[in-house]
Image (cartoon, rainbow, N blue to C red):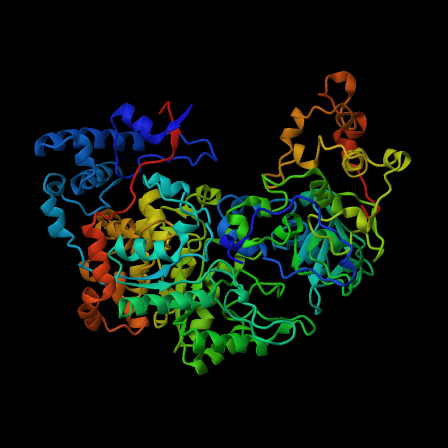
Amino acid sequence: MRADEQSGPPANESVSADTRQTRSFPDYVTGDECLFCHRRQIGPTWQSNPHQRTVRRATPDDHAVRALRNRTGDSADFLMGSKRLIRFLRRSRQYGKLDLLTAVYRPPGAHGRLESVQNRRWDSEKFAAQCAGCHTTAVDSQTGAFAATGLDCFVCHGDVDLAHTNDTRHIFLSQTRREPRPVVSVCGQCHLRGGKSRRTGRPWPDTFLPGEELSADFEVDFSDAAIAALHPMDRHIFLNARAVLIDGDETTTCLSCHEVHAADSAKHESLNDGALCAVCHRADSGGGDLRESLLPDNVLEEHSEICEY
Amino acid sequence: MWVPKWQRDRSRGVDSPIPTQVVSNEEFVPRPQTRQQRLWESLIDDMSSHHAKKVGMSRRDYMRSSMGLATAFLASNAVYGPYWDVDAAEAVEPAATEEKFPKGEYFIVDVQTHFTDGVSLGFRNHEFVRNMGFQLDENPDAYSFTNFVKEIFFDSETSIAVISGVPGRETNRKLDGREVEGRARGGGVLPSWLMSRRKNELNELSGSTRAFCQGNCAPNHYWNRQTNAPDFSALFDQMEREVKRYGIDSWKWYCHTDPGRSGDGFRMDDEKLAYPFYEKSRELGLKVFSVHKGFASQSRTLGHFAHPGDLEKAAKDHPDLTFICYHSALKHGPNEPQFQEDGFFDPETGDFAWHADLMKIRERNPDLTNIYPEIGSSFGLLSIAHPEMCQHLIGRNVKYYGADHVIWGTDCLWWGSPQWVIDAMKRFQISDELCEKFGYRKLTKHDKALIFGLNAARIYNIDVDAQLKTLPADALSERKAAYLESGGQRDNAAAGWVRADV
């Protein structure tokens, strides 16, 4: 549709997700098409952005790739993970599928080590069942096939119409469209780890589109006990999501602190939210000191059952 | 503190018609002026004051004349080296410039021109456009076909334009199998159906051949997800449509994009994917393949497919096909951070990524004559931002591929009217030092005539002699004359923000 044929700016309400059961993802505009225009602002830095690198191409000079090749002679097409655990992936013969090697590489860098080498095998089911929803784009609920590796623009910004060039309110999470519920829902589709799709049972929501109610399909345990049991890094996400999605608090969202494109959270230092700050910072230190559980050694011990590290 | 560039220039008595420092578009902190930039600006100031007095003009009026532009180029040569062809006489005699660079001297075929389907893209207020003192409109009208005609034809010396494609794919059929037409086909900001429609409109209006057009269809655009293989039936359907119904004159490929969600980009030497496309295209009678190479940050995950390495085998295996390598494979533009990284450009060898790899292809294959480096954006950007690299770009293209293979393109109207790029090429020259050190040669007027249009004319089967007779008398020329007579001119006002302390 031409921009000048738009009848006006989009409505701000969240989109109803009632009819989602039978649908598939729309034929969205891919990130490479987006970058034709946004090459200057986004292109140069996006290659190194963590959201872009959820699945990244395996390069011969990568320590993990080198270790795998030298020790086993195997090669991989892609890598997943960085600080705690690196996994090896290869293209499947099927559309939108990756095989996951059972051997893993435990960083850091050249001092890391290859583990589970004996009896290693390429698992053709696991990535589609457990990882694809948050490491790739537009996963088909029925086949488990994804449309693109990494997180394409579509994951956060939705199916963007050309009309956005004249009115950025046509894009979710743009500077002019940051309503709290959609923002937290978009981030929560992956960062609320432990949630589960009611329809598919998978650890990510079924065919979720930006602008929709996350809770329509995604079941998350927001109880005090469950949240208290989380690692602080996860806990602050759950607390904020509960405040916005359940309690209707609209003062703070993920974007209040995190600049996703810039991979920067410097803004969080200006946040005026004692409870959320206290998840990570000692209240008696004027906000400066981290709690002991977040000191460097302990951060490395952060783990996730969902992600198996 | 930031101040508008015009404000600082006025307070300091500077009125340069070409940029003497990086100007911000408000999205980043302007960089301080370098020592060379300060010297350049100071020289412009001194020389223009002197010359303006000599010819009896106010300094401001003088800087807006061809003499003022010549002064800026003279000052630049004094600071950076002699890469602009400009004589001292041009600074005080307008006739010297007119004699040296007569309008219409070159037959210009621009193989890389664009407009959009009613959307603005943010290119026309790009930092380097502002650097040049241009204040271009940034709205849908500025990207429209109407403005395209004005800026490409009325505001510049361009004779013929090839409307060039951008990433995007058309939807050929609805779910019920019926073909869709017009805007319902989608296809992004400049779809094939629209390029074709506008080409025909322009040629009908002109009563001549003023426009050619490209088609966006590419090997990975239609994908069978059940078999995880190309849907050749749908692909060939679309190819036939673009050649037979749209009358496209070349394909325009972006190997590093995946609008059909095939799961990957594609290589031009992929025998299973690209070769059937070549075969089908040959059968349809279309043998020109224009392909974007370089500017790799335009892709999210597939930037490596913008490397020119795959051209070698494709061109060797298909000697009857013509491959035009757009942007001469310049990997990153001057405004990208990677451009500044150590090793991107090696002044000792003249190599820069991935242009050096494109040169090596020809070096390895002296008989490979069906690859043509195109210089759209690469020449314009480097001529302003890095004159030394610009000399290597052209020097090496000519050295390895020959002046009869370098193709003129500008990427306008992304950057406004292409006349500034045309002016830059007219004055562009390679220094004695680089010629001696790297085996380049000075560009002759004949070389420039080849680059500006005679090479592209050969590829697109344009009868230059016939066109030279026809075009000056066609309806478009009549309208251009009326436009100029009524005072029409390019927009050229200074804009942007600089630091007040420099």
Q: Is residue B494 left or right of residue A44?
A: left
Residue extending farthest bottom: B283
Q: Is residue B409 left or right of residue A147?
A: left
Q: Is residue B407 left or right of residue B268?
A: left
Whole-percent x and y of residue A75? 68, 61
Whole-percent x and y of residue B37? 31, 33
- Front-most of residues B69 and B370: B69
Q: Quadrant of residue B446?
A: bottom left
Look at the picture and state if A85 lies above or below A247: below
Whole-percent x and y of residue A70? 68, 56
The quadrant of the picture occupied by the C terminus of chain B is: top left
- Front-most of residues B372 and B235: B235
Residue drawn 81% across and 51% down? A217
Q: Quadrant of residue A186?
A: top right
Whole-percent x and y of residue A255? 66, 36
Count of number-bearing discs = 0
